[in-house]
Amino acid sequence: MGKTLVLLLFIITGFPEATAQNSLPPVFEIKTDTTLMQILPKQYWQMLPDKGGKLKIDDVSKLPLANHFFYRGQTTNADTVENVYWIRYQIKNTTDREAKISLNSISDYDDFYLQKPDSSWMHLSSGSSRELDLKDGLKYVNIIPIVLKPGEGYLVYERIENKGKGLPANFIISLAGTEAVIQEDYVEKVDNTMIFNSLHMQEAFILGLLFLTIFLNLFFYRIVLEKVYLYFALFSLFLGINRLYNITAINLQFVQPDLAHLTRYLGLAWAFIPYFLIQFFREFLYIQKSYPRWDKLLAVLGISNVIAIFLSLFDDLFFKNTDLIYWIGFSIAFIIIPVCLIITLLLFIRNKEKTIRFVIAGAIPLLLFQVLASPNETFNIKIEFIEKMLDAYYRLIEVVCISWFVISFSMILLLRFNLLLKQNAQHALDKERLFREKEIEKNELIEKQKALLEIQVKERTAELNESFEYLKSTQSQLIQSEKMASLGELTAGIAHEIQNPLNFVNNFSDVSNELIDEMREELAKGNGQLANEIAGDIKQNLEKIHHHGKRADAIVKGMLQHSRSSSGVIEPTDINALADEYLRLAYHGLRAKDKDFNATLKTDFDETIGKIDIIPQDIGRVILNLITNAFYAVDEKKKLAPPPPKGGIESPQDHFEPTVTVSTEAVIPPLGGPRRVQISVTDNGNGIPQKVLDKIFQPFFTTKPTGHGTGLGLSLAYDIVKAHGGELKVETTEGEGTEFNILLPLT
């Protein structure tokens, strides 16, 4: 019965505890306590998020929560954005002497629970944000010393709490060597201060060097506008931001640790340092020309690095598996890109150009250092020689490599700049020389062309002079021809006009002869009174003969004036009589040519005008031309008019009566100015089409059929009126008629 009770008691109390113990992580063996820091690999510690932040040690150390702990990255359901986490791990001293180690606090608030052999808990506190009087251990460096006897060990539960942030992506569990910490942070405080100041001096040196590099390369870029200088300036800028991040992070870590997390955003510089370095190499080495596929790979790597760095900095906000994101970003930035750039440089190692060899020599040390300095635990690669060298000389090697890289590339770019300046100067000289050669050739060609042109000009001038003389002769002939044409139109009318006074002369001559015979008879009879009366009749007849003879003489003189060239003599002229005379002459001339022609003539003369100073034969020629054109227009419309209906009554709409009206009027402008006389010639013909209205005063332009006009009539009329200081205007309506107006100064 007693054995059964003991068994039940074991099952009730011991089995859950045994179950919890079976899920514990493996024991981390402490083999030395002389190193400054020992990092526990991830397989030696487990974690449990505390969403509410209210769990106690008794809650997490017993079932069921004791079996909910998991390894970092073990499950995709791990919530790493909580402020509070529980961590547990086991440590054991495997040396043959006491191990003096310290529990390391790297959070805002840390609570350590160490399970004693009697299953009770020893509680110790620390943390960067906890008040000093509430801390245990070495308060200023946030470590808690413990001593483990040979073979002794502890199960450690650690509660960590951070303000406003989750579990960092680079979170680690580490143990410090107590004596090493005391030696470094207390005994060697003066030496540490010197090292700290030296670190600042090194970073300040690099920042000054980078600032000078940025300035010089931007200056070079502004002059030569080559992207290689811009890319290197941007690379140096973001590298300087990264170095500033290092200084700021170190200062805050020692001075104000609770603000150190704010510097994480300066770490974004690593998104652009490799990117612009890749762009620099692509531009400097012309990789696209030599290795186009490799160039595309580098471009993709540069963009991938930017994306990966941004994701790794904010992975705890957007991703649950933060280890994978962090590992990808770290691998691209610190491993893949440096290796690819080293391979790129090796592709050009056989290039005989000195600048490319200098680039290789300046870049490979920093790229190799970047690859070798990557944390070994990320890839589980242990190279003891490299570890020791980096532990002892990491900062010195880094400063030397960066300085060598920046100085080497600055010198290379300076040499490239000088070379470009020389090339540009040589190009400018070549361009100037070529320009001068072209100018000389151009001047020679111009001289040749000038000489040739002079010969051609002389030849053309002679030809033009000859053509001009011919044109003058032709023009005179055409003008004379136009005059003769108008004279021909007047011939019949003049003959008709002369015939009337000649008939009077002949008739009165015959009557006078008969009266003389009668007078002789009466004288013979002695009838003197009747003879005197007959003598009076004879005198009247002689006066009439004289009058009609003068009229014939005037007609002949007018014909002669019209036919010969103008004398240019301005004479006082009765414009009404001149217009009436040429109207009748033109009408009778056209009637003599065409017996079927008939038109109604209308006149409306302003008798107040009196005489005006004009060249009568010139203005007469203008009036004659306008009247002749008017007769032609009404005659053409008459020919095209439909015939009257047979056997019916002709309506006014069917009847067309050709009408030409000549009128004169003294015009007084409404706003003042010189008085003018207006001579109007109006017809009711077909009018002038609008499309040719602008051309009617051009020489040789005519709408008449071939053989019916020279095209010079209106042109000459326009010039004659202009020469008199007047204007020749036209108003027309298609299908209704045309009105020409001659405006002459009235003195």
Image: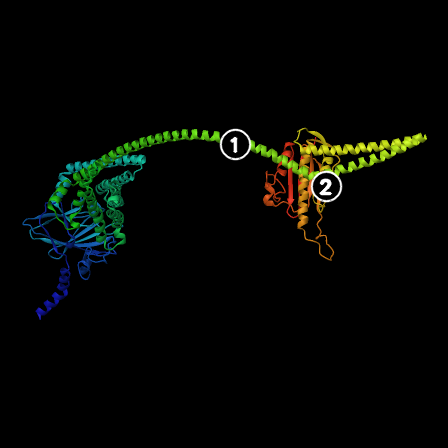
First-in-chain label (2 vs 1): 1
- Foreground of the two, 342 or 632: 632
Q: Position of residue 103 (x, y in %)?
A: 15, 49
- Foreground of the two, 465 or 64: 465
Give the structural element (helix, strand or loop) at label 2: helix
| 159 sits to left or right of 481 | left
User: Residue beneath label 2, please?
Assistant: 588
Q: Quadrant of residue 688?
A: top right
User: Residue beneath label 1, please?
Assistant: 464
Q: Position of residue 350 (x, y in %)?
A: 18, 41
Q: Position of residue 701 (x, y in %)?
A: 59, 41
Q: Is the N terminus in the top left, top right, bottom left or bottom right quadrant? A: bottom left
Q: Quadrant of residue 358?
A: top left
Can residue 19 be seen here? Answer: yes
| 382 sits to left or right of 462 | left
Amino acid at pointer 1: Leu
